Image (cartoon, coloured by chain):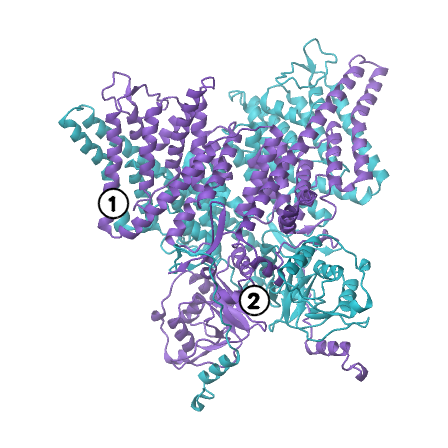
Chain colours: A cyan, B purple
Amino acid sequence: MISTAEEGTANGILRKLSLMVPPIKPRVIKARSKSFTHVSSKFESMDYDVWSNELLIKEEQSKSYRQVVEVDILRWILFLLVGIFTGLVAVFINISIRFLQSLQFQYVLHYMQNCTTGYCEFLNYLIWYLAFGSFTLLGTAIVVFVEPGAAGSGIPFIVSCLNGVCIPHITTLKVLIVKAVGVIFACVAGLATGKEGPFIHVGSIIGGIIINGARKIKIHWLQLKLAELNNSREKRDLIAAGFAAGVAAAFSSPVGATLLSLEEGTSFWSVILMWRIFFCAIASTFTFNSVTKLILNGVIGGAVGAFYIYASSKITFYRKRFINNSALQLIDSAVLSFITAIFGIVSIYSVQNCIVVKDTEGLMYSFQLNCSQGFYNEMSVFWLNSQESLLRLLFNTDMFQIENLILYCILYFILFIMINGIQLPTGVFIPALVVGATWGRIFGLILLKIFPQMPATVPIKYALLGAAAQLGGLLRTTLSLSVLVVEASGSIIFGFPLMFTIFTTKWVGDFFSENFYEAMINIVGLPLLPADPPPLVSDIEAKDLMNAAVVSFPTKVSIQYIIDVLGRVKHQGFPVINFEFNFQSNGTSELCMFGELQGFIYRHQLMTILHCKLFSPPETPEQVEKILSSFRKYENASVHIQNLNLNEDEKLKIIDLKPFMNPSPYSAQAIMSFPRIFRLLRSLGLRHVIIVNNTNQVVGIISRKDLAKYRCWRHAASMGLKELRIR
Amino acid sequence: MISTAEEGTANGILRKLSLMVPPIKPRVIKARSKSFTHVSSKFESMDYDVWSNELLIKEEQSKSYRQVVEVDILRWILFLLVGIFTGLVAVFINISIRFLQSLQFQYVLHYMQNCTTGYCEFLNYLIWYLAFGSFTLLGTAIVVFVEPGAAGSGIPFIVSCLNGVCIPHITTLKVLIVKAVGVIFACVAGLATGKEGPFIHVGSIIGGIIINGARKIKIHWLQLKLAELNNSREKRDLIAAGFAAGVAAAFSSPVGATLLSLEEGTSFWSVILMWRIFFCAIASTFTFNSVTKLILNGVIGGAVGAFYIYASSKITFYRKRFINNSALQLIDSAVLSFITAIFGIVSIYSVQNCIVVKDTEGLMYSFQLNCSQGFYNEMSVFWLNSQESLLRLLFNTDMFQIENLILYCILYFILFIMINGIQLPTGVFIPALVVGATWGRIFGLILLKIFPQMPATVPIKYALLGAAAQLGGLLRTTLSLSVLVVEASGSIIFGFPLMFTIFTTKWVGDFFSENFYEAMINIVGLPLLPADPPPLVSDIEAKDLMNAAVVSFPTKVSIQYIIDVLGRVKHQGFPVINFEFNFQSNGTSELCMFGELQGFIYRHQLMTILHCKLFSPPETPEQVEKILSSFRKYENASVHIQNLNLNEDEKLKIIDLKPFMNPSPYSAQAIMSFPRIFRLLRSLGLRHVIIVNNTNQVVGIISRKDLAKYRCWRHAASMGLKELRIR
């Protein structure tokens, strides 16, 4: 009932519209079980989506890649600061606890030691309770009266915060102070409690407030950059890093801390985030342990690694181009093998250097040649043994002379470059470790010559660092490489210089080139999607990227038409639209049709329908089960369109695709920006995103390659976007 | 020009429709840089999206949770098999290489040792080349003629495969065999190459074919389950696990292998996947090293941990309920502190046991009491020292007697339970380690009494395992816990029994309860979203979950209306729709309106517009920059609606929201199923998903809580779905 007086007014029109488009009534869902716990409605949710609007796109168009790099560097610095501050707070807490505990012990000892019987015993109870209980009460008092949010470990709140639940007043400076003081009292009170929960909370708080803290510095340039970083997404990452920094400070275990932050804490993950968290955890442990060693190995590793990647890319590229038949490939192998043999035997004969082989495991091969009894040719040890045995010698003994190491290092490095692209199963880890261990040892021996007062184990240490740096220069991983080298060398004491070397390697290497496998992937032209979209592409929209020649099916369609379409196009999936015409093909049918998006169906599902003649909708559960099992059976099998066995009657049948199609495929508006499309496809692991216009009509389709061809390059601190050819 | 003859035919209608809805012309994007590399068009993309249709939903409705658990167990077994088979292949390769190398050395030694001058030297070159070069040629020949896909390390292909690029013929049994034989020859040939690349490829192949292999077993029940697992998503996870298994076999380093697989390999990540990969890597290393130790500690740790979680949930719950003001909280603390003190002092006085304190670091506190010079009361060592010092003693010395350990373990465990929910910053790691180390030591001492022939270090080893098991029982993490304990104890040799214990702990604990922080999160009612949607909910649709009372804004709207709406509802974001009426509020305005989705705007952005009076669209880049900086400034600041300072003229102004709104928010159809909505919101970290009908009109909105209230519970191998109350 709309009164006439209301007609034409805003409300009237609105109400009419509401009547015209009735809201969809939500169905009441029967829960599968009763519950005694609850979801609290008092917590708001965070939004980790990157917001976007016209203004932002305009701003981006005026930005240069230089600004992107600047923000990137600023971000690393913020992570570093989180680590350092967390370490400092942890040091403060630890020193305070030790100091108070020693006072406490003096007091208890003074009063109790001298009196052990009768009336005294009761007094002792009181003294003991005072010595410990007073701290409990003090701690509780400041928590209760000053900041109740500081109670407990705080980890559940941080975990929820990282998952996307907004918890107010959990990352404030006040909580930090009360937490720090409270945990000192709790620990001195001798309660059954640990420091690591509060440490984690403290680290997370520092992560949460670091941006606001940095904004106190009134430099206009810095202010602008920080404003860009001041969003929930960046804050989330910094809180996750603070989480790890807290654990790292509590256990002096940066690797474990990073992992705990990932396993227990963060709900959102990317490799880059992991590196940042790991970096922050190292910074925290460094600060806590006051270790400040600087190492040149990382720089060498990064640079040599980048050179290796460049050289091996070239050699693989030329091999792919020129050595393209079996005969040439065999000759290629023979030549390489000949060079390897020549290098080995010539160097053995030319260097007449006799040594005692310290063969601890009875597995070393070596030639005596012209050496006297018990001595062996040193060069033959390099060339005759497996590379794993050689590594063990380089890491554990003091056998090799510097001239031989230099000769072997150069020859082996040449071979190591030349092997790329050869027709053999190959791996780069062990050779990289051998090369790195060799030059690391050379470096150590030189150091020892210059500074003879250094310990004799320096060459061994530097062999380990060199190996890590060389491999790091190829892989550019950090966390896994640290663990691999530590686990492989069986020694954990040398952890910090190692991690430092590996991070230096990564930065130096990234300055020059991408990593080894990325380089190989680029040569083959694999359409890989990185974790994040390239920067500064918000002005590119879905409609600029999409393939407009999308082929759709109406919901009801003749078998003949399906056969025609599948025979003519190679697409792997087809939108289903509400084009309500019982369509019959006449051979020259128009493939492009438009209509409202109803669903999506895969090629293999259509093939299964045709192959198994599933032309009528299923009715009983047994039929459903049967159809599904054929769908699953043919999901990865390829049935050819020529092998279908359908007669003319069957071809004229009309089939309803509704029961078979996916009724709610992920779709996006034609005006959605590149980064948003990218995240949708990449995060959900999709093959296609259907593009619709503003009335939900299918206008295009975007697949991986449409996104992969825009690639961000970085070289020597500059970066840009390039469009790759698709071929 | 449509000919009349065509009118009414299918083609005619189609062509007309095409004319009516012209396709959107893609804009040509200027690349920011030229490129010499390319994206190859020959590679198809994979689809890691879970397909869905009506049939699948029908099938799910007839399924029970028991079937979900069965598939889950089968999945773990598949991961185990990948690890074992990869380990076996690696063992085969290693043994073959050693055997061939020893033959090779015998041959070279035999011919070369006896002849070192003149003519002989030339012969030696030839013999050397034959000994090494023949293997190179053999290896190349089988690669070139049998399976060229086996060349190189294979890692780039596996990485691309995990990213979503489909590479045919890369995970077949033929590649595996050629790869295995080829790498043997390549290694024996002495080329600069490692085994780990091929190992990784072999592991990935085993992961890729394991499901098809298992389907060879003709058991109907198994066949059905395997058919469900036979999709790209599962295969991707198994390949990632195989990747890790390969590295683990090459380096005997399961932790590093898992990390490398995550850092370098997988593009999609979840905690559960990491656990599976880690498990597979352990299985591979176990097989490779033939270690088969079974340990009871895991079972105890899991069970005690689950009990602890149950007890501490209860005690936290009651504390929250009954101890709800400052006075009670202080009394509570005083009582707890009193009990702690009583436990300490009574046990010190009642156990008169004198020992020598092995004080290596000069930091131990202890009472002499009635003991003679140089001896101290053993119990006082437990209660006087910090828990970190105590842990060091438990892990490194043989000080404590079994009776004292039992007494302390019981008392401390009681205190450890009672401290939950107290108003103090607390942590559980260190106390859990202390409890675990204590009962681990007790367990070790009992073992030593039963089997006196065991080494005397057994109690120390079991203290370490017990500590890991107890902490694992609370946290249920695997990878990070292993690394933490190894890094903290400084000993890496004890890695395998440790990892085995931790996994047993996880399974036993998960059988009884969720982990400690989840339990705490549930008590507070935090709306956390797990990594995956609950099982068997495909029949629940967006329209059943959504909040239909969504409040939208038209693109052009009066300031007064914005103020009215923001004052009346608390929503944090609003869809913008094309309701083309210049809307003016009259105080009783209707908030629900329907229209085509145009964009989305946050409350804080609207508040910024009102607060900073941004009523006209910006024109110059400076204006853009200025508006954006105010947007960023107020993103996290809360301006109150009452504090706005707007005059009546300003309130009557009409504002165009287009430049400020996000033009392409993520939206979903009303019929999208629960799991798909869940993945969209969770993977992209969204706060809202806008629900539209099939003509893109806004009909509702889904936020985190609408999804979080459906929670999957697991207990003692059964599971189900419960709906939590929101309060």
**SS at badge 1:** helix
Q: Amino acid at mark 1?
A: Asp
**Residue B245, label in figure:** none
- Given this view, does label 1 or label 2 mark the residue nearer the observer? 2
- In terms of depth relative to the viewer, which is nearer, A680 or A286? A680
Q: Residue B696's x, y, as percent?
A: 57, 72
In terms of sequence position, does the residue under pointer 1 or pointer 2 come before the other?
Answer: 1
Outermost left residue: A119
Q: Within 10 angstroms of label 2, few (less than 14), some, or many (20 or more) residues? A: some
Q: Amino acid at mark 2?
A: Ile
Q: Which residue does the numbered mark 1 point to in the structure image?
A: B332
- In terms of depth relative to the viewer, which is nearer, A152 or A31? A31
**SS at badge 2:** loop
Q: Residue A292's x, y, as percent?
A: 46, 34
Viewport quadrant of the N terminus of chain A: bottom left
**Residue A150 drawn above or below residue B26:** above
Q: Which residue does the numbered mark 2 point to in the structure image?
A: B671
- Residue A701 in sight from this viewpoint: yes
Q: Are marks 1 and 2 in contact (CB under 8 Å)?
A: no
Q: Residue B119's x, y, as percent?
A: 86, 16
Spatial separation of the CA atoms under disc 1 and disc 2: 52 Å
Q: Chain of mark 1?
A: B
Q: Within 10 angstroms of label 1, few (less than 14), some, or many (20 or more) residues? A: some
Q: Is residue B431 left or right of residue A599?
A: left
Q: Is residue B371 left or right of residue A702?
A: left
